[in-house]
Image: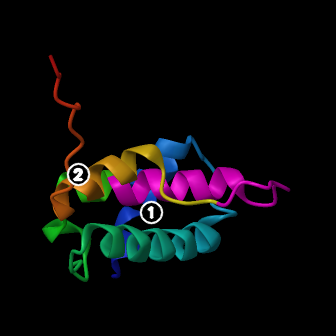
């Protein structure tokens, strides 16, 4: 089993896909999403799902569903990380958003 195979059922639940016709496409998208999330988080992914932290698991699944939903659409907007994946990977990089300090 691969990481994409381990995450396939969860991705289908998240996307509300109840058929198997797109499983091979979803596995490709899961692999691409995993690579995107790992690069953004600066994290080395395990080969299978059980060792993957839950938040990164969700980031990969959410990214995959965003890619699946955007397939075939003619859009001027480049597809980057989903909002959830961006927030999760930022924690791994130590990125912090802070309020500007008040000046008196």
> What span is in magenta?
59-78
Query: In the rendered view, does 18 fall on the left or right side of 84?
Result: right
Residue at x-position 37% and y-position 63%: 7
Q: Which residue is mark 2?
A: 55
* Type of secondary structure dominating the magenta stretch: helix
Q: Is residue 85 above or below residue 25?
A: above
* Image mark for residue 46: none
Q: Is residue 3 above or below residue 62?
A: below
Residue at x-position 57% and y-position 66%: 26
Disc 2: CA contacts within 10 A as few (<14), some (14-19) or many (>=20):
few
Task: Tell me residue 68's x, y (percent).
Answer: 63, 57
**Splitting the image into 4 quarters, where does residue 97 fall?**
top left
The reply to whether callout 1 and callout 2 are in contact (CB within 8 Å) is: no
Q: Mark 1 or 2 closer to N-term?
A: 1
Q: Is residue 103 above or below residue 62?
A: above
Task: Tell me residue 9's x, y (percent).
Answer: 43, 56
Residue at x-position 21% and y-position 80%: 44
Query: In the rendered view, does 80 fall on the left or right side of 46?
Result: right
Q: Secondary structure at mark 1?
A: helix
**Splitting the image into 4 quarters, where does residue 20 fall?**
bottom right
* Image mark for residue 8: 1
Chosen colour scheme: rainbow
Report if residue 68 lies within the magenta region: yes
Task: Tell me residue 80's x, y (percent).
Answer: 54, 60
Task: Tell me residue 39's x, y (percent).
Answer: 34, 76
Disc 1: CA contacts within 10 A as few (<14), some (14-19) or many (>=20):
many
Report if residue 85 lies within the magenta region: no
Residue at x-position 19% and y-position 47%: 96
Q: For the N terminus, give its image quadrant.
A: bottom left
């Amino acid at each position: 089993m691969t990481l994409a195979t381990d995450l396939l059922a969860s991705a289908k639940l998240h996307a509300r896909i109840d058929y198997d016709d797109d499983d091979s496409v979803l596995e490709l998208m899961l692999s691409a999403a995993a690579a995107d999330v790992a690069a953004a988080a600066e994290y080395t992914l395990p080969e299978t799902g059980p060792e993957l932290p839950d938040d990164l698991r969700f980031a990969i699944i959410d990214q995959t569903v965003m890619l699946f939903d955007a397939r075939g659409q003619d859009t001027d907007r480049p597809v980057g990380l989903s909002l959830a994946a961006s927030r999760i990977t930022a924690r791994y990089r130590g990125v912090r958003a802070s309020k500007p300090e008040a000046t008196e």
